[in-house]
Image: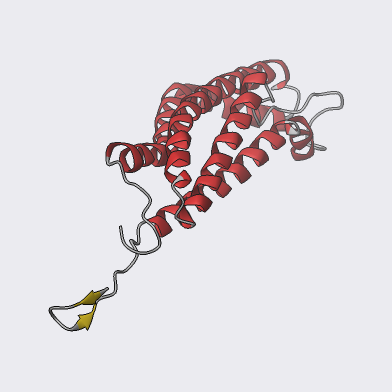
Amino acid sequence: MDNEYAGETTEIKPAGWPKPIGVLSLVFGILAVTCGVAGTGLSFFSESFAQTMSFGQLPPATPPFPMMPSASPLFIASGVLGVIVNIVLIVAGIRLLKRQQQGRTLHLAYALLGVLAAFVGTYAGYVGQQDLLASQAAWAEQYGEASDYGKQIAAQVDMQQQFAGTSQAVGSIIGLAGWLAWPVFCIIWFGMAKKVVPPAYGN
């Protein structure tokens, strides 16, 4: 734009905030999808993993010590929901980098779904850990005295059970806070602050 009074040309620089937020959305979305797919997939192979870890250390016909939560319907549903929500975030990040208004709409949609997914995921994780602890305690009681390896595991289970309640509560709170961080930011930035995606030049 020409400045008639100063006799010089002033260039209006494009607003810079869409780029860092778009990049962060892409990074967070890709990481979350990768971890979600990997975590859900590994739950189907928890027994095989446990058998590999305890191979040759337990008497024959002894079932492996449970090390991971089983692939329960709640756990699978939580994983699928998390993947879908973060795919929305990835698309939102791409749209924002292109400075399209859909970037704002999709970020708001992600934020609302992300809050839901965070609570569902935290609950699913808590239930899964409770089931895992119960399975471990049952295994230790039934097979803990069958071998030296079993006795070591039983001792670890006893110690773990003493701090299970506190550690689970703290872990759930920290995990929930982490999953809520970006959705809450998006609600504040795109919703409460009503940030509209600026064009390539100017606001």
Classify residue 68 as left or right of residue 110. right
- Work out whether 125 lies above or below 18: above
Which of the 4 image quadrants contains residue 176? top left
| Nearest the eye: 19 or 103 | 103
Identify which residue is drawn at 51% across, 43% down.
89
- Residue 121 is situated, as x and y percent measured from the top left of the image, at 53, 28
The residue furthest front is 4
- Residue 188 is situated, as x and y percent measured from the top left of the image, at 31, 39
- Work out whether 200 lies above or below 88: below
The residue furthest left is 5
- Residue 161 is situated, as x and y percent measured from the top left of the image, at 51, 22
| Nearest the eye: 121 or 127 | 121
Classify residue 56 as left or right of residue 41. right
- Residue 135 is situated, as x and y percent measured from the top left of the image, at 65, 19
Identify which residue is drawn at 35% across, 62% down.
16
Task: Assign the C terminus to one quadrant of the image.
Answer: bottom left
Identify which residue is drawn at 42% across, 44% down.
104
| Nearest the eye: 36 or 61 | 36
| Nearest the eye: 52 or 104 | 104
Task: Assign the N terminus to one quadrant of the image.
Answer: bottom left
- Work out whether 123 lies above or below 10: above
Classify residue 62 as left or right of residue 26. right
Which of the 4 image quadrants contains residue 43? top right
The scheme the figure's colours follow is: secondary structure
